[in-house]
């Protein structure tokens, strides 16, 4: 094996001096890099969601998120007005300085004495701790050799893409403004696009799973992120940068990541459930391995929640039963459990979905709309009240607002798996067709059917079945 110094010595030993003309020198590259970095920095302090144009200030929301996790962020909050002013004035030096200071203050923030996050709830930072705290529901093994399995996987993916296409146009707004702008949503509010960043991470998981099956590790998944994903946002952006610096899971999901309990893991649980049909325990373990790439504790439990629901959809028909059982598989001493369980209890006490949601909307007003909690509550409410009807569920999950594309994509996958394409009206299916566009390297233009086939074949391969 050639050593590193040998490569370098060979390079230098064979280098012949060249005198460049002034116009041939490459210092301009430094200015190009600086401009790209500056644009990225400005996005942290003010941007609009690509699909819906909802306004957001992501680093301000990161400060908010650290407070949600029981940290004292007073010193970081003091810098917000100065940072916003620097962004407005395009004061590069000041904004760079303040941004680094904010991250330092968040990294060094101390837990608030007596805060419920630390005093009341248990932290779940490894799978064994989680698995020992719950009882899994068990089902007869699903026949993954059958044509019916292929149909369920394909319908699940189609339903997910439809949900994402509907939600992308309206994410980031609250229920009142969605109602005012669109009335009751029973169709696409614009020509649908299958371009959505949320499936990016599911495809990366699928790529790793297709190679390693049920032995797939968090490190395997992280390396597919590095290979396939050009850029991320919030928790995923930080995790991807950590990975590229050699900081692997679980630290990649925790280090310098104030967004680690946002929705980014919760939004990709469906693929783990599809890869573990009728096996919630295995789905939960896959979700944990995937979740810690970019998230921690309650953020990871959010992915488990959606994964076990999708797993159960292969053998359950009632959406209300699926969500009830999924809640049972969340540790009852976790904060995430309190979110989904209290949402369930609220449903039982409420006359309709919107009256239940209005309570949650107020309850979680201190949480960003991309945080796992308000979106988990929205999922519970829509599944509880939808009466097992695809369009009713899509209407409800749209009307409550928040991170609609993530929520709709995940819970509508349950309908595709459980009930098949027949439960989806042609008005949702026809505009989508089979094309799938993304910014994933190698998957810029593919087919939904191709992704579905890869999913089904990967599961068969993981079970030792010849493809």
Image (cartoon, rainbow, N blue to C red):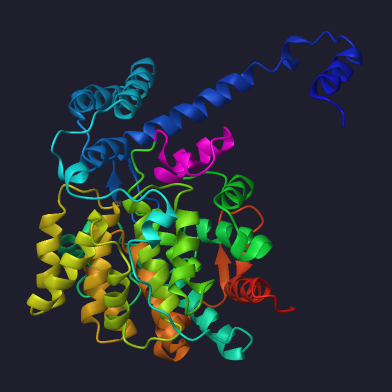
Q: Quadrant of the C terminus?
A: bottom right
Q: Nearer the viewer, residue 321 or 399?
A: 321
Q: Can residue 179 be seen in this view?
A: no
Q: Which of 455 and 45 is in front in this view?
A: 455
Left or right placement of residue 160 versus residue 78 in this view: right
Q: Position of residue 190 (x, y in %)?
A: 37, 68
Q: Where is residue 16 in the image (x, y as percent from the top left)?
A: 90, 12
Residue at (14, 75) in percent of width and height? 347
Left or right placement of residue 126 versus residue 451 in this view: left
Left or right placement of residue 365 versus residue 319 in this view: left
Residue 2 colored magenta?
no
Residue at (59, 75) in percent of width and height? 452
Q: In this view, does 313 lie above or below 166?
A: below
Residue at (12, 71) in percent of width and height? 346
Left or right placement of residue 433 versus residue 51 in this view: right
In the picture as drawn, the residue positioned furthest to the front comes out as 132
Picture quarter containing residue 143? bottom right
The residues colored magenta run: 233-256
Residue 255 colored magenta?
yes
Q: In which quarter of the image is the N terminus?
A: top right
Q: Where is residue 288 in the image (x, y as percent from the top left)?
A: 45, 57
Q: In this view, does 215 lie above or below 246?
A: below
Q: Position of residue 323 (x, y in %)?
A: 29, 75
Picture quarter containing residue 372? bottom left
Picture quarter containing residue 154? bottom right
């Amino acid at each position: 094996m050639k050593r590193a110094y040998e490569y370098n010595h060979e390079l230098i030993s064979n280098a012949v001096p060249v005198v460049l003309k002034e116009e041939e020198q490459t210092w301009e590259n430094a200015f190009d890099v600086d401009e790209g970095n500056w644009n990225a920095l400005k996005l942290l302090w003010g941007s609009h969601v690509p699909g819906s144009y909802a306004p957001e200030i992501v680093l301000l929301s990161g400060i908010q998120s650290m407070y949600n996790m029981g940290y004292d962020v007073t010193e970081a909050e003091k810098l917000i007005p100065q940072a916003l002013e620097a962004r407005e004035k395009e004061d590069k030096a000041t904004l760079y300085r303040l941004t680094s200071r904010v991250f330092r203050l968040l990294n060094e923030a101390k837990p608030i004495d007596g805060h419920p996050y630390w005093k009341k709830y248990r932290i779940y930072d490894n799978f064994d701790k989680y698995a020992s705290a719950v009882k899994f529901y068990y089902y007869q093994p699903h026949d993954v050799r059958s044509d019916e399995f292929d149909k369920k996987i394909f319908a699940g993916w189609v339903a997910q893409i439809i949900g994402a296409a509907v939600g992308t146009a309206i994410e980031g707004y609250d229920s009142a403004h969605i109602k005012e702008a669109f009335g009751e949503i029973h169709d696409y509010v614009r020509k649908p696009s299958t371009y959505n960043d949320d499936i990016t991470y599911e495809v990366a998981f699928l790529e790793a799973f297709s190679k390693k099956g049920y032995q797939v590790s968090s490190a395997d998944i992280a390396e597919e992120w590095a290979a396939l994903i050009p850029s991320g946002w919030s928790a995923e952006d930080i995790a991807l940068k950590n990975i590229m610096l050699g900081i692997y899971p679980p630290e990649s999901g925790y280090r310098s990541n104030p967004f680690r309990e946002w929705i980014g893991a919760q939004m990709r649980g469906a693929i783990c459930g599809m890869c573990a049909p009728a096996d919630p325990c295995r789905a939960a373990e896959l979700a944990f391995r995937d979740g810690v790439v970019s998230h921690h504790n309650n953020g990871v439990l959010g992915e488990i929640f959606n994964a076990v629901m999708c797993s159960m959809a292969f053998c359950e028909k009632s959406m209300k039963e699926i969500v009830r059982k999924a809640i049972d598989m969340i540790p009852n001493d976790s904060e995430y459990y309190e979110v989904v369980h209290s949402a369930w209890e609220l449903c039982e006490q409420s006359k309709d979905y919107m009256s239940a949601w209005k309570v949650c909307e107020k309850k979680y007003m201190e949480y960003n709309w991309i945080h796992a909690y308000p979106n988990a509550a929205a999922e519970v409410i829509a599944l509880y009240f939808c009466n097992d009807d695809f369009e009713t569920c899509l209407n409800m999950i749209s009307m409550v607002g928040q991170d609609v594309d993530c929520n709709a994509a995940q819970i509508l996958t349950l309908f595709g798996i459980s009930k098949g394409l027949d439960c989806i009206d042609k008005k949702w299916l026809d505009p989508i067709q089979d094309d799938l566009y993304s910014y994933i390297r190698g998957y810029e233009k593919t087919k939904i059917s191709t992704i579905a086939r890869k999913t089904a074949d990967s599961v068969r391969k993981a079970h030792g079945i010849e493809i």
